[in-house]
Amino acid sequence: MSRNSDNASRTAMLPRGVALHARPAGMFVMEAHRFRSTIFVAANGRQANAKSILEVLSLGATAGTELCLTASGEDADEAVANLARLLDALG
Amino acid sequence: MPRTSLESSYVSLILVSHSYKVAYGIAELVEQVAGMYVPVFPVGGTRDGGLGTDSPRLLEILQRIAREPGGVVIADIGSSVLAVRAAVAELALTQRGSVIFADAPFVEGAIAAAVAASTGASLGEVVRAAEQTRHVTKL
């Protein structure tokens, strides 16, 4: 059986002075919405749907937290790459 | 202050509370998370500064946003809900399709709706984002 879906994952560190709260969380979720893939972000032993602002806020990810991004879908690679770049650029 | 420009291609958000502080406080929070692009209209308190709903102002806002791409209304509790239902009923039939009263928690629904709206989502998608927050657990 053939499968069309792709999986991708990547880790990213929240830069110094940046928590995944308020505006940064909003920007992250908005970026996630640009992709068709299902995307999750995990931190502190919790996992959130990257397209849900409430779930992302509930991660409580503070500066220096390592985030694990995973995506599945046709644009999975691009999704995790773009989200990791966005997190880097917040610093 | 929340942005209230009407020349927006983004779905608007109307936040209705008994309290001026609640409506404007949530509007401030929403803007922090979702940015400045989504038009947010807080409606809270009476004209003399008491607790209640300024129904004429609510209706005026609904009439202004009742066109493409439309607006989502979220209310807090009790008579705010009744005030919104009464105001929506006053709209012309042709306007009602562009103003949707979402059955959503006030804070969570407002934030989720604003983030969805800021991605350029349609009226239906923004309503769905707001209403999905009914099922999000906190702990």
Image (spheres, coloured by chain):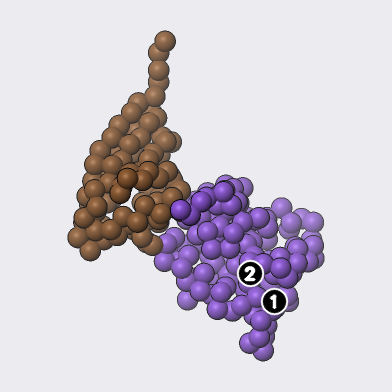
Name the image quarter holding the N terminus of chain A: top left
Q: Which residue is disc 2 drawn over? A: B16
Where is residue B76? Give x, y as percent. Answer: 63, 66
**Residue B64 in the figure: left or right of residue B13:** right
Evaluate whether label 1 is on the same chain as label 2.
yes
For residue B64, say whether it is visible. Answer: no
Residue at 67% across, 89% down: B48
The image shows residue B130, relative to residue B20, as above or below, that is above
Task: Tell me if residue A13 comes above or below residue B21 in the rendering.
Answer: above
Q: Mark 1 = which residue? A: B53
Instruction: Please give the letter of the chain rendered in purple.
Output: B
**Label 2 residue SS:** strand
- Would residue A85 appear left or right of B37 to someone viewing this image? left
Q: Are marks 1 and 2 in contact (CB under 8 Å)?
A: yes
x, y (%) of residue A71?
Answer: 35, 35
* Disc 1 residue type (three-letter): Thr
Chain A tint in image: brown
Chain of the residue displaying label 2: B
The amino acid beneath tag 2 is Val
